[in-house]
C-alpha cells in the first residue's frame, strides 16, 4: 500500500497538480488537508475518473480534509466521535477504513501565537485526537493518522530552532501534546527512517525564498500503529512537488509525504471502529 498525506493549500487552485501527481505516483490512499472546498464543490468526479473513491468534509474558504482511495472506502466519519452537530465546527478530521486500515486525515489548528486562545484550542484539539484514538480504535490494530499537525516534533524538524524561539509549532506544550498522541501506540515513520538527520522538511514559507534556502519545517506526519510500522518499506517527502511547475504554476507550500507498506493477505486489517451515525461525506 502506498499511503500519502498532502496539505494542498486549496484543492481548487491545485487540482491539476494533484491529478498529475496521482497519475505519476499512483497512491493507494491519499489524505488531503486544507482543501478549502465546500462539500458540494468537492471535485469527486475528477477522482472518480482516476479510479478513486473519495470522502470529504469542508465548509468552503478555510480548512477542509479529504481521503481519496483506490482500495476501498468505508465506515466514514467526519469530526470527533463525541462532537455535537454544529455549523461552527471546523472541518479538520475525517476517518475512513481503506483495505482494512483505519485512516485518519487530520489538520491540526495553527495556534497563531503562544498563550493565545487559539493556542489553547490547538492543545485541546490534540488532546481530543488522543481521546478519539482511545475511544474508536483498538491498540494493536492497523491505524494510520496522517496530516498537517502544525507541530515540528523536535529540533531536527526545523531548519533553525533559534529562529522560532517563543513561537508556535515548536513550543514544549505542543510537542508534549503530540507525544501524547503518539503514545497511544503510533510511530513517526519518516523520522524513524531519517534517523538523526535534520529534516526532511515538508513545509516552506512562500516568502523570502525559504524553499530554495532550505529553510523549512517537518510538520506533515504519517503516524502508524506498530502493526503497520513493521511493514514500512520506504518513507519520504516528495520535495520535487514543492517546486514551481514548468508553466510557472504555484505549488502548495507543503510537499506530499509518502509511505510505502508491504501489506499482503497474511496481514489483514483488524481495526475495531465505532460509528454512531452517518457523517457528511
Image (cartoon, grey):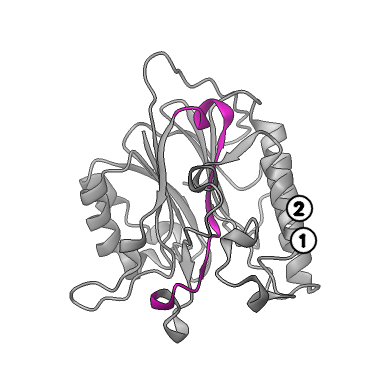
Marker disc for residue 172:
1
Instruction: Look at the image and give the residue range highlighted in magenta.
Output: 212-231
Marker disc for residue 205:
none
In terms of depth relative to the viewer, which is nearer, 259 or 37?
A: 259
Percent across and percent down for residue 1 are: 36, 33
**Magenta stretch contains residue 46:** no
Residue at x-position 41% and y-position 63%:
8
Q: Is residue 124 left or right of residue 34?
A: right
Q: Residues within 10 Å of mark 2 (few under 14, many from 20)?
A: some
In terms of depth relative to the viewer, which is nearer, 265 or 86?
A: 265
Residue furthest to the front: 196
Tell whether label 1 touches label 2 (CB within 8 Å). yes
**Magenta stretch contains residue 220:** yes
The residue identified by callout 2 is 176
All told, the count of numbered labels is 2
Residue furthest to the right: 115
Percent across and percent down for residue 114 are: 76, 73
Residue at x-position 55% and y-position 59%:
219
In terms of depth relative to the viewer, which is nearer, 21 or 38?
A: 21
Percent across and percent down for residue 196 are: 56, 51
Percent across and percent down for residue 186 are: 62, 37
Quarter of the view holding residue 55? top left
Give the SS element for disc 1: helix
Quarter of the view holding residue 267? top left
Residue at x-position 36% and y-position 61%:
239
Amino acid at each position: 500500500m502506498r499511503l500519502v498525506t498532502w496539505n494542498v493549500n486549496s484543492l481548487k487552485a491545485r487540482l491539476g497538480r494533484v491529478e498529475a501527481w496521482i497519475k505519476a505516483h499512483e497512491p493507494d490512499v491519499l489524505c488531503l488537508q486544507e482543501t478549502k472546498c465546500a462539500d458540494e464543490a468537492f471535485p469527486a468526479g475528477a477522482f472518480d475518473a482516476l479510479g478513486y473513491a473519495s470522502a470529504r468534509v469542508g465548509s468552503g474558504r478555510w480548512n477542509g480534509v479529504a481521503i481519496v482511495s483506490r482500495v476501498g472506502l468505508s465506515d466514514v466519519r467526519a469530526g470527533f466521535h463525541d462532537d455535537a452537530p454544529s455549523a461552527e465546527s471546523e472541518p479538520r478530521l475525517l476517518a475512513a477504513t481503506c483495505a482494512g486500515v483505519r485512516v485518519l486525515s487530520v489538520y491540526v489548528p495553527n495556534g497563531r501565537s503562544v498563550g493565545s486562545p487559539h493556542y489553547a484550542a490547538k492543545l485541546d484539539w490534540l488532546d481530543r485526537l488522543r481521546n478519539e484514538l482511545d475511544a474508536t480504535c483498538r491498540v494493536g490494530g492497523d491505524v494510520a493518522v496522517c496530516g498537517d499537525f502544525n507541530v515540528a516534533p523536535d529540533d531536527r524538524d526545523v531548519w533553525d530552532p533559534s529562529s522560532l524561539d517563543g513561537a508556535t509549532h515548536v513550543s514544549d506544550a505542543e510537542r508534549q501534546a503530540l507525544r501524547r498522541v503518539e503514545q497511544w501506540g503510533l510511530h513517526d515513520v519518516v523520522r524513524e527512517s531519517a534517523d538523526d538527520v535534520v529534516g526532511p522538511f515538508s513545509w516552506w514559507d512562500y516568502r523570502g525564498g525559504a524553499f530554495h534556502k532550505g529553510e523549512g519545517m517537518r510538520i506533515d506526519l504519517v503516524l502508524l500503529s506498530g502493526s503497520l510500522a513493521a511493514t514500512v518499506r520506504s518513507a519520504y517527502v516528495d520535495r520535487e512537488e514543492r517546486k514551481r511547475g514548468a508553466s510557472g504554476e504555484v505549488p502548495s507550500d507543503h510537499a506530499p509525504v509518502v509511505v510505502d507498506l508491504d501489506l499482503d493477505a497474511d496481514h489483514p486489517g483488524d481495526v475495531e471502529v465505532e460509528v454512531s451515525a452517518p457523517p457528511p461525506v
